[in-house]
Amino acid sequence: SPPPPSASSAVTASVRRSPTSTMDFGLPLVLEEGVTSQSDIRYIERPPAVKSDDADGGGGEDKGGDESSSSRSIDDLLVDAANEAAVDLFLGPPSKPVASPPLKRKKDDPSSSSSSPSTPLPQSASSLADRGDLRLVDSRLYPERSLPLSALIRPDSLVVIFESFDNLNFLYVKSGSVFSNRNGHFHHDDFVDLPYGSRVRARSGGSGWRGKPADPGFVYLLRPTPELWTRSLNHRTQIVHELDASYVTFGLNLRPNMVVAESGTGSGAMSHAVMRTIAPHGRLHTFEFNRHRVREARREFAKNGVGHLARVHWRDVCGKEKTDGGIGEGAAASENGGGGGESGKESSRRSSVATTDDNDDDDVDEKMGHGGFHPLAPSSTHAVFLDLPEPWLAVPHASLVLKSDGRLCSYSPCVEQVQRTVAALSAEGFHSIRTVEVRLREHYVDALELEGPPTGRLPREPSVTTKLPQGGVGRSPAGAIAAAKAAAMTESDSKTDGGAGTATGSGGAEGDDDATPAPTATIPPKSTRGGKKRGGRGDWRRNRKRLKKAAAREDDDGGADGGGGGDDDDDDGGMGGGGQ
């Protein structure tokens, strides 16, 4: 066989210039140097060892015992072990374990004995050569395969325009074109040579409030992905959004280089998600019975650079009704579920149009409307995805093209469709059937400041200072009560002494009904001085004010009573004064 190419030629030979208008997953893989190719792991050819007796002319036989003729240097043992590990890594382990000769020990080594296990030596070069071509044991021949990412926007590139979270659009960059929206007018020439993710401001503003010119806005230029394409494409039918598409991809267990069949192309949103998963060498066969949607899907796949991964077929998979025109009324009546009927004028010229379109070699006229996944062979598909209004009609055809242990997924909005599909799957021998409903629950996060509980000690209430008019000063409620009691005792004493004088003095004026009794100061009972927490303290303050007023009136009225007694009776006035 010819010698293997060098590492540099192996890398540069597989590099292809990526087209500008394409999604990244549709690009061919690029071979680049990686960790493996730079590790310098390879098979090292070692010259045969020269015996010491040949070098010494035969005079060195059995020099130093068995060590001179059979022992090997540590470098030779290390190289042989590395060669064996490299062969196991690149060519795989041997099918049968190879017995290695035991390592001989020195005779004077006391640790050596017949019962001690022998240490195996690395395999020889002849035994390694029997396991394969040793020239393939070279890490430089195995560069890493990576997906090239488009760093800059070029003419004809596909760009997703991000206006807001709920407003996305797409365009193909063309020189001299202008993209206009509410944020202003954006010239495509300003997009060229900018990296994806850039923010571009409009040259002129758009229409503002009530037609007034607004300030120029800006948009973001994003790299196209199946998720962004799903949110920005023109909906020809109801589409499978990214949440459901991710679960379908997971449920079908899709992997690269698989063959997948899809019925119900629609707007092509699910098709892009499947193609990204099965790239770079997989194949998607998507079937659609609406002629307009077939044309649009082929045009978009080719323009997005993923046409080599998909093949769009104009065919009714269910085969519900066969007519001379192809698809019958039964299929045309199911327009609401991802398919659509066609007019008689379009059906009459189907044969002439079908021969002019690309990627339509298998849609011959006599095959239309028969049902099934033609041209797929039996047991040739890894997974089948059905997005149809009546998927139970396509289940028997899907079971024919599926491989053993292949998977089928049906996407239906109504539970009645699910029930009939599950019954059809059970009748066709499918197992592990399950129904899953996926819901999207969004959470809106906003900043909210909550006042936490106090952590420090609360200040004590200030003490109550009471100033009585007769000179008594109380610094607390207890002191005020003591002062009030003293004032009450003084008042009682004055009533005892002054009461007699008043009676004597008033004896001279019997029948005088205008005599005003002396006021008395009352101390509130203990129950009114207490109370619960703040209410009791407020009651005490009100009572304290009443005590102050009573004491003031006592001073004024007491003096008046003493003077009055003197006026009524001069002899007894002194007694009245003494009573005061």
Image (cartoon, rainbow, N blue to C red):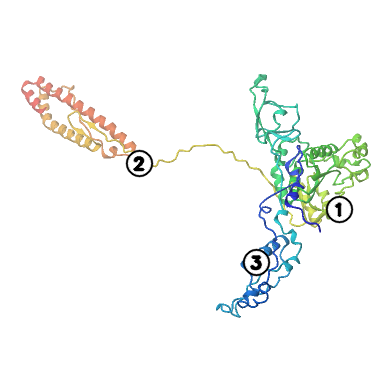
- Dividing the image into 4 quarters, which one contains the N terminus? bottom right
- Residue linked to disc 1: 377
Mark 3, other Cα within 10 Å: few <14 / some 14–19 / many ≥20: few
Of the residues shown, which amino acid type is indicated by label 2? Arg
CB atoms of marks 3 and 2 within 8 Å: no
Question: Mark 2: which secondary structure?
Answer: loop
Q: Is residue 411 visible?
A: no
Q: 360 and 78: which one is in front?
A: 78
Image coordinates of residue 484 in percent, x first then y, are 20, 34
Residue 292 at what x, y percent from top left? 84, 36
N-terminal-most mark, 3 or 2: 3
* Secondary structure found at label 3: helix
Q: Is residue 495 left or right of residue 60?
A: left
Q: Nearer the viewer, residue 114 or 107?
A: 107
Nearest to N terminus: mark 1 or mark 2: 1
Q: Quadrant of residue 132?
A: bottom right
The quarter of the picture where the C terminus appears is: top left
Q: CA distance from mark 1 to mark 2?
A: 83 Å
Amino acid marked by disc 1: Ala
Kind of residue at badge 3? Asp
Front disc: 1 or 3 = 3
C-alpha separation, residue under disc 1 versus residue under disc 3: 57 Å
CB under 8 Å between discs 1 and 3: no
110 left or right, relative to 216:
left
Residue at 26 percent across and 38 percent down: it is 525
Taking 372 as reference, is 523 above or below it? above
Q: Is residue 314 left or right of residue 574?
A: right
Reading the image, the residue beneath label 2 is 457
- Residue 94, position in %: x, y? 72, 67
